[in-house]
Image (spheres, rainbow, N blue to C red):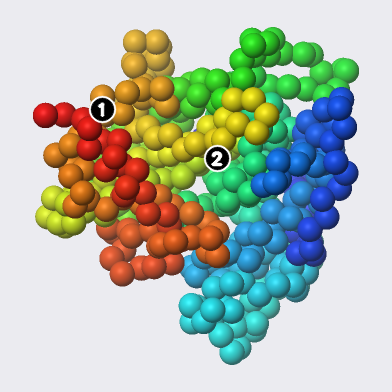
Amino acid sequence: LLAASAFVAGRPPPVAAAAALHLGVDADASGSCASNSTHVGWILDDGRSVSMERDEARSEMAAYLWRNVMPYDVSDARALGFDPDSLGSTPGIIERGESSLTGDGGGALRSVSRAAREGSAVDGLSDGVLNQTLHYALEAKARYPWTDAIPRSVYLEYVAPYAVVNEPRTDHRQLLFDAVDGMLAEYQRTDGPTVPKLRGPAPDETPREQIKEAVRLINTRLWSALGRESSPIVFRAGLTPRIYDPLSVVAYGHSSCTGLAILLASALRSAGIPARMAGTPAWHGNDDEGNHGWVEAYVPGDGAGGKGEWAFLEPTPGIAEGQEDAADADDLDRDPCKRWFCQRDRFDGSTRTYATRFDRVEADATYPMAWAVGDDGVPGLDRSDYYNEVCGKCGQ
């Protein structure tokens, strides 16, 4: 399984892109903004639909990630696959003085060898995690029809990133992309006459319904698909931050709630479904009562201009191959009160809850990590009001 995520021949070219945005052309009545292998269709925040060439979309993604790069990644920017010289703009974290990488920081960014900077095929060097992540984020746009119903700003922030929090940066996107491929085969589209057309979703299914079913399938089948023979990935408490990045969870076959949430969120992203981790660093604000993390997924609204929303679910590990139908994995349509932690005695107004973000400008908070107290490097969104409202109605 680990070999599946290794760098392979035919890798995408190194990222070298201007930060300027070019929107391409507006969509026409024929639906020309549907994404394919050469063009990417976007819905803008003002409701307009536009199309751009795939390389241009890749450049835009890279520029966005560079502007919002987390502090942990600045010194290793080139090793990750960023090309600051070409991307041009300075990451916001440096502009605001939030990073220790100032003054001679440019020297640190240029410390990698010239062969790596230029993408030469030198033994032992590749083009970094960033490029693989962007390649498969765009592959998902071409493959899954629901991606054309997701606003560009949401896709950039919750599908394009190579990380969720401060977990080790590993090359997991291809592994997860391949793992979910078979689970979602019936939903895949093709744009070439020589490629056999798959059955496709039911014609009356909306992108909202497609995403909900895709989330259910992934949360049901992911754990056996990435586990060892007859031994799915399972929950084991007390492992963060030792085992919480996707490849470590796959390698060991277990993790606590944080690692499982990061793995599921990353798997959803590999299918072009915006996802983030949510959780509380301490029940009732008391460290002694423990913490918990889960996943939120973005679901677009029905119809043109329908407002999308974030819904939550828990990872459901431990489902072995052949047991999927009877497993009753969590999904986005489940009554929130059916989840063990979504109860009034936990959400009585004293529990603070947050979701992860990547956009540092728009974030209204930082994501507090129970395993890294005081670390404010991950942008966040305060979701306390939402969970106190929803879960505060549950239980006796």
Check the image and report above or below for 318 versus 262: above
Residue beneath the point at 61% across and 40% down: 174
Residue beneath the point at 34% across and 10% down: 326
For residue 139, which quarter of the picture? top right
Q: Residues within 10 Å of mark 2 (few under 14, many from 20)?
A: many
Find residue 378 and report its horizontal and vertical position in percent. 44, 61
Residue beneath the point at 43% across and 34% down: 311
For residue 211, which quarter of the picture? top right
Q: Which residue is mark 1?
A: 337
Find residue 288 and report its horizontal and vertical position in percent. 12, 55
Check the image and report above or below for 18 versus 311: below
Find residue 91 and report its horizontal and vertical position in percent. 61, 71
Q: Amino acid at mark 2?
A: Pro
Give the number of callouts.
2
Find residue 347 and report its horizontal and vertical position in percent. 21, 43
Q: Which mark is residue 274?
A: 2
- Left or right of residue 48, residue 259 in this image: left
For residue 85, which quarter of the picture? bottom right
Of the two numbered discs 1 and 2 on the same chain, state the one appearing first in sequence. 2
Which mark is nearer the camera, 1 or 2?
1
Q: Can the viewer see residue 214 in this picture?
A: no
Q: Nearer the viewer, residue 385 or 61?
A: 385
Q: Nearer the viewer, residue 163 or 3?
A: 163
Residue at mark 1 to residue at mark 2: CA–CA distance: 24 Å
Residue beneath the point at 86% across and 48% down: 24
Q: Nearer the viewer, residue 299 or 214?
A: 299
